Image: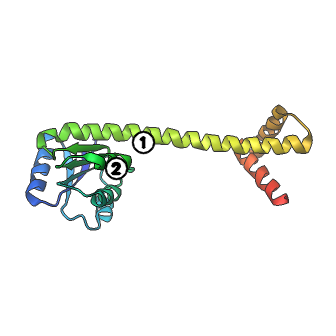
């Protein structure tokens, strides 16, 4: 059995909070937690470990928006933010900080489900892109280290690039290690000998 989606709703106005919780419960099976005071928000959200965070604020200032955004952990989970006033530059700030959905004109109960679905989908896409970017960066860094190790071998042994790489690969196989691990050890050792 799949456990229901865990949602934290951040809303300081009690009547609006009740309306949001009712709207969520009428649109699906959710495990809803309510936070009515934003002080210590990061700690409170971490205590629930929700799948999604919904934040409803009337007219946020840039400082308030940044604080709420960072406290809600937009890189850890989807965050949908509902604001009443015009978005202006605040929308850009929120999206750049990782907010998955920034909805102007406030939170309407009948719009909860589609906004929630869009926020989750966007978060998953962004997380996949971040993962791929991290892997690409790591691969590039590993490539640089391997190239440096090959250069050291080429210079020390007077061999070509292909033989230098074959030497690294053979050493890795013989030691049961990855080529990058052998290359890092070689580069580190060469640095110590300078």
Residue 10 location, x and y as percent? 21, 56
Colour convention: rainbow
According to the picture, the residue beneath numbered tag 2 turns out to be 93
Q: Which residue is mark 1?
A: 127
Vertical position of residue 38 compared to residue 107: above or below? below
Q: Is residue 171 visible to the viewer in this orientation of the structure?
A: no
Q: Nearer the viewer, residue 75 or 29?
A: 75
Q: Earlier in the sequence, mark 2 or mark 1?
A: 2
Residue 190 percent across, percent down from the top left: 82, 54
Q: Residue 23 appears in which quarter of the rendering? A: top left
Q: Residues within 10 Å of mark 2 (few under 14, many from 20)?
A: some
The N terminus lies in which quarter of the figure? top left
Give the Cα distance between marks 2 and 1: 18 Å
**Residue at the extreme left:** 15
Q: Residues within 10 Å of mark 1 (few under 14, many from 20)?
A: some
Q: Quadrant of the C terminus?
A: bottom right
């Amino acid at each position: 059995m799949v456990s229901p989606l865990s949602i934290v709703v951040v809303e300081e106005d009690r009547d609006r909070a009740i309306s949001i919780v009712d709207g969520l419960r009428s649109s699906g099976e959710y495990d809803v937690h309510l936070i009515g005071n934003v002080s210590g928000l990061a700690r409170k959200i971490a205590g629930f470990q929700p799948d999604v965070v919904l934040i409803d604020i009337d007219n946020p200032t840039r400082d308030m928006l940044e604080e709420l955004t960072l406290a809600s952990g937009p890189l850890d989970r989807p965050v949908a933010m509902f604001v009443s006033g015009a978005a202006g530059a605040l929308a850009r700030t929120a999206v750049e900080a990782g907010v998955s959905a920034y909805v102007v004109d406030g939170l309407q109960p009948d719009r909860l489900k589609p906004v929630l679905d869009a926020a989750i989908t966007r978060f998953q896409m962004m997380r996949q892109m971040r993962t791929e970017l991290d892997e690409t960066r790591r691969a590039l860094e590993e490539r640089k280290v391997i190239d440096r190790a090959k250069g050291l071998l080429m210079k020390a042994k007077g061999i070509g690039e292909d033989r230098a790489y074959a030497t690294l690969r053979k050493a890795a196989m013989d030691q049961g290690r990855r080529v990058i691990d052998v290359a890092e050890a070689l580069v580190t050792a060469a640095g110590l000998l300078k």
